[in-house]
Image (cartoon, coloured by chain):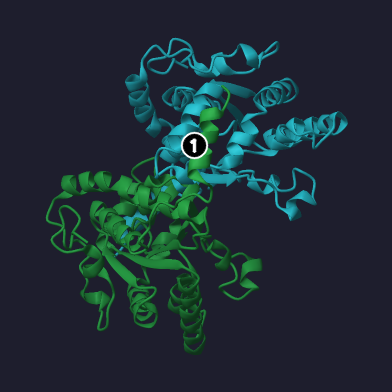
Chain colours: A cyan, B green
Amino acid sequence: MPLPVGFTKHPADLLRVGPEFSLAKQPTNASPGFSGKKADGAAALTARAPVLAELQEKLFAQSRFGGTKSVLLILQAMDTAGKGGIVGHVVGSVDPQGIKLTTFKAPTDKEKAHHFLWRIRPGAPEPGIFGVFDRSHYEDVLIHRVHEWADENELERRYTAINKFEEKLAAAGTTVVKVMLNISPAEQLERLTARLGDPTKYWKYSPTDLDERKFWPEYMDAYQRVFEKTSTENAPWYVVPADKKWYARLAVQEILIQAFEGLKLEWPVGDYDLDKERARLKDAVI
Amino acid sequence: MPLPVGFTKHPADLLRVGPEFSLAKQPTNASPGFSGKKADGAAALTARAPVLAELQEKLFAQSRFGGTKSVLLILQAMDTAGKGGIVGHVVGSVDPQGIKLTTFKAPTDKEKAHHFLWRIRPGAPEPGIFGVFDRSHYEDVLIHRVHEWADENELERRYTAINKFEEKLAAAGTTVVKVMLNISPAEQLERLTARLGDPTKYWKYSPTDLDERKFWPEYMDAYQRVFEKTSTENAPWYVVPADKKWYARLAVQEILIQAFEGLKLEWPVGDYDLDKERARLKDAVI
């Protein structure tokens, strides 16, 4: 597979979490593998959008003729890191028909009464669908670890349950791509301040953002543990530097394109007799 | 409200179904109210996409602070008329976060065992959401009338049930916009033939398309009846000439923009103390 234009190395290879991965050593304000600047990145994003859209259309088309494959993007990040921007600017280039987006907020009382994966399972994509989780079951080992709502034994059980859940998804034909958008606390502060300086962004601000921010080191520890416990061959994590929004979007787009290309998708032939249908069309009355 | 650029009359006014409406008299290969050609139409569609996107974002933002409004677009048409293109090129310009798309296929046995609106209700948009029905409960008074799966008495009951259902949606804060994409049989034949001439489009073809085509006059009668019975003040029908795809997309976009503008949406103020939060941000530790 040739490298995407502007890249000297594929971001999927550079950003995939491997053994010995250390979140603390990852840059947040960088653009690994990409040789251009912001304007180049924005142009590349636009240029590659139709590629992702066509891959998704092929996936969808295949599902109409028995194809069982699907893709699931799981997005996790600290507040303001840009999950919404990935949904809007990367996922948003794909036909809505092929997207199943699930946003996970704080669980309801009913959800809390069930196993933590109970509310997650219905979000899994059907064949042909590009599923997206905006937050996910990882909250149950992130915020729950930070605030000690779950003890070590329980956390261990959850990592195991998560790996088993994602293995089952993979076995059923779902390519799982997990992305953590990695911003610095300084960048977050700037973005929160920008939100309170722009009336069109007030609605995105919540006072709890600042409360959670105080636990930044604990969150980073929890993420590190997540990567160690749950970055598997079938469901790898990618940690994407996200201080530059344009880079994060471009990198996630390319990671997704690579995932879709790995499915070796072809346009399906129909389940009908092509010649016979062409003849029927010729005879059709206007 | 000023007219959108390129229009001499607003398409919503020109295409809304009123008393004495006759489907048989409607053009299919026309661009009512628009003074430009195809390239102008395509440019206008691109130019207006961010307007629709921002209106939807405002709707979504409001719902975060108690707003109860939503919008529902119902799409009906003969095969190949371009419902998919509306979803991809008009709805697709909106952030996926704000969209709830439901595609209604032939009902399952389970769905058939229930009232015809049973499978429809869960598709209604929540506050802040732009809901889209690709086909709808209108199939129950269209294909069912054409094939005589429902007799006149039953059809009457269904029109009444539909009006009541849509009235309730409106009363709950949902702006209902119903669009019929109106193509000619000749244009359909051309599009079906194009599908069988392009391997990237084989998957969109189904032999049943040609079977249903034989009932064209019966379908037009059924649509005429639908318009007479169910075009109400709160849930009007728009019949959009659709032989020119570019016009249909542009007209539906403007009809939607008008519907959103009718909601008089403003960016919400937060439910927090702005000055206090600004002060907290200033004191925040990096």
SS class of the residue under badge 1?
helix
Query: What residue is disc 1 on?
Result: B278
Residue A188's place in the image compared with B97, above or below, is above
Residue B163's place in the image compared with A274, above or below, is below
Residue B152 located left or right of residue A227:
left
Q: Position of residue B253 (x, y in %)?
A: 30, 55
Residue B38 located left or right of residue A209:
left
Residue B81's place in the image compared with A78, above or below, is below
| Residue placed most toward the observer, B80 or B104 | B104
Residue B218 located left or right of residue A216:
left
Whether residue A65 is visible here, answered yes or no, is no
Residue at the (51%, 48%) spot, across then down: A271
Q: Position of residue A51 (x, y in %)?
A: 41, 31
Which quadrant is home to the C terminus of chain A? bottom left
Q: Amino acid at mark 1?
A: Arg
Image quadrant in which you'd find residue B4: bottom left
Residue at the (75%, 35%) spot, across then down: A144
Tag 1, which chain? B
